[in-house]
C-alpha cells in the first residue's frame, strides 16, 4: 500500500479506497522509491485531486464578484452539465465553452485574476481536495520526488492550487495576454487528451526524468495517453471506460468518493470547459520561466 494512504483513510473514513489486486499476488514493492531523483508524479486535477471542475469553481467566484451576468452563469453551468451527462466532448460544444470562459477574462489584468484566484481557492476549492489523492501526492513529495499538476484548467488556477498543496508546479492553460492584459485568445491548442501526454513527455525531457519510473494519476479515459506513458499509472475515481481499461491492464485503482458519488462512476469529469488550456510547448516554457 502506498505510504500516506493510512493517514488519508483516517482523515476520511467514509471514502472508499479500492485497490485492484489479484488474490495471492505478491506484496508490492515500496513505492514511491525514496531518493529516486529521476522519478516524478503527474496528477490530473478535475475529479482526481479536486471534486468537480476547477474552471467551474473559478467561474462561481468571478460571478460572485460581478464579472458577468446571471444569464452567463446559467450558460456556463449548462455547458458543465452537458459535458458531465453526455460523456462526449463534441468539438462545437467545447469551442463554445472555451469562448465563453475566455470572454469572461478578456480585458482583465493577469495580476488581478491571480489575486482573485487566491481568494476563490479559499472560498470554493480548498474544501474540495480529495484527502486520499492529497496523501498520494504527499507520499511522492516525502520520497523527495517532484509532483506536477497536468490539467486542462487555466495554468493560473492550476499554479495556485499546486502551490497551496505544496506541489512542484503545474501545466495547464496558456491564455494570451499583451502587456499583462488578457486578449480573450488561447496560445496554442487545448492541453487535453493526447496533448497532456505530449506535455508530460516534454517536461520529462526537460527535467531528465525516466518515465518508466514515474507515476501518473487521473479519473478520465481521456488521460489514457498520459497514463500509458509512465511505469506506474493510477486510475483515481475513474469513469467507466477508465475503470475497465485499468482492470484489463492491471493498473492500480483508488476510489475516494462516497458511496453515493461512486455510484455515479459512469459520469465523467466536466472537462469540456476545463479544456480552456494552453499549448504543450508553451505550458512547459511557462513553467521553466516561473521556476
Image (cartoon, grey):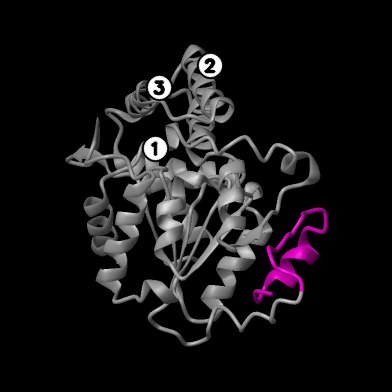
Looking at the rendered structure, the secondary structure element under dot 3 is helix
Mark toward the start of the polypeptide (1 vs 3): 3
Q: Quadrant of the C terminus?
A: bottom left
Relative height, residue 247 to residue 277 (above, below): below
Verify whether residue 77 appears in magenta: no
* Residue shown at the point (29%, 44%) measured from the top left: 278
Provide the residue span drawn in magenta.
1-23
Tell me the crowding category of disc 3: few under 14, some 14 to 19, or many 20 or more residues within 10 angstroms, Cα based. some
Q: Nearer the viewer, residue 216 or 221?
A: 221
Q: Which residue is mark 3?
A: 93
Q: How would you classify the magenta stretch by its main secondary structure?
A: loop
Tell me the crowding category of disc 1: few under 14, some 14 to 19, or many 20 or more residues within 10 angstroms, Cα based. many
In the displayed structure image, the side of residue 278 where residue 11 appears, left or right: right
Tell me the crowding category of disc 2: few under 14, some 14 to 19, or many 20 or more residues within 10 angstroms, Cα based. few
Mark toward the start of the polypeptide (1 vs 2): 2
Tell me residue 227's x, y (percent). 46, 58
Q: Nearer the viewer, residue 61 or 228?
A: 228
Residue 149 visible within the image: no
In the displayed structure image, the side of residue 98 where residue 189 appears, left or right: left
* Residue shown at the point (31%, 40%) measured from the top left: 190
Mark toward the start of the polypeptide (2 vs 3): 2
Please name which of the two marks, 1 or 2, marks the residue nearer to the observer: 1
Q: Nearer the viewer, residue 111 or 223?
A: 223
Q: Which residue is mark 2?
A: 74
Q: Which residue is mark 1?
A: 275
* Residue shown at the point (60%, 49%) measured from the top left: 244
Amino acid at each position: 500500500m502506498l505510504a500516506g494512504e493510512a493517514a488519508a483513510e483516517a482523515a476520511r473514513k467514509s471514502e472508499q479506497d479500492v485497490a485492484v489486486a489479484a488474490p495471492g499476488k505478491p506484496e508490492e514493492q515500496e513505492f514511491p522509491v525514496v531518493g529516486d531523483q529521476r522519478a516524478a508524479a503527474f496528477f490530473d486535477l478535475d475529479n482526481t485531486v479536486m471534486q468537480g471542475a476547477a474552471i467551474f469553481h473559478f467561474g462561481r467566484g468571478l460571478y460572485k464578484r460581478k464579472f458577468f451576468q446571471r444569464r452567463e452563469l446559467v450558460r456556463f453551468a449548462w455547458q458543465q452539465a452537458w459535458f458531465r451527462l453526455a460523456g462526449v466532448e463534441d468539438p462545437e460544444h467545447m469551442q463554445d465553452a472555451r469562448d465563453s470562459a475566455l470572454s469572461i477574462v478578456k480585458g482583465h489584468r493577469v495580476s488581478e485574476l491571480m489575486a482573485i484566484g487566491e481568494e476563490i481557492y479559499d472560498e470554493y476549492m480548498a474544501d474540495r481536495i480529495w484527502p486520499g489523492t492529497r496523501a498520494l501526492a504527499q507520499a511522492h513529495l516525502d520520497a523527495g520526488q517532484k509532483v506536477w499538476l497536468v490539467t486542462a484548467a487555466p495554468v493560473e488556477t492550476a499554479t495556485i492550487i499546486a502551490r497551496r498543496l505544496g506541489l512542484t508546479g503545474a501545466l495547464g492553460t496558456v491564455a494570451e495576454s499583451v502587456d499583462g492584459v488578457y486578449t480573450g485568445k488561447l496560445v496554442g491548442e487545448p492541453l487535453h487528451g493526447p496533448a497532456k501526454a505530449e506535455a508530460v513527455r516534454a517536461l520529462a525531457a526537460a527535467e531528465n526524468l525516466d518515465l518508466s519510473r514515474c507515476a501518473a494519476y487521473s479519473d478520465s479515459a481521456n488521460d489514457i495517453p498520459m497514463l500509458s506513458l509512465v511505469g506506474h499509472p493510477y486510475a483515481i475515481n475513474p469513469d467507466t471506460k477508465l475503470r475497465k481499461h485499468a482492470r484489463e491492464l492491471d493498473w492500480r485503482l483508488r476510489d475516494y468518493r462516497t458511496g453515493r458519488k461512486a455510484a455515479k462512476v459512469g459520469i465523467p469529469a466536466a472537462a469540456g470547459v476545463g479544456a480552456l488550456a494552453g499549448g504543450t510547448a508553451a505550458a512547459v516554457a511557462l513553467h521553466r520561466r516561473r521556476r
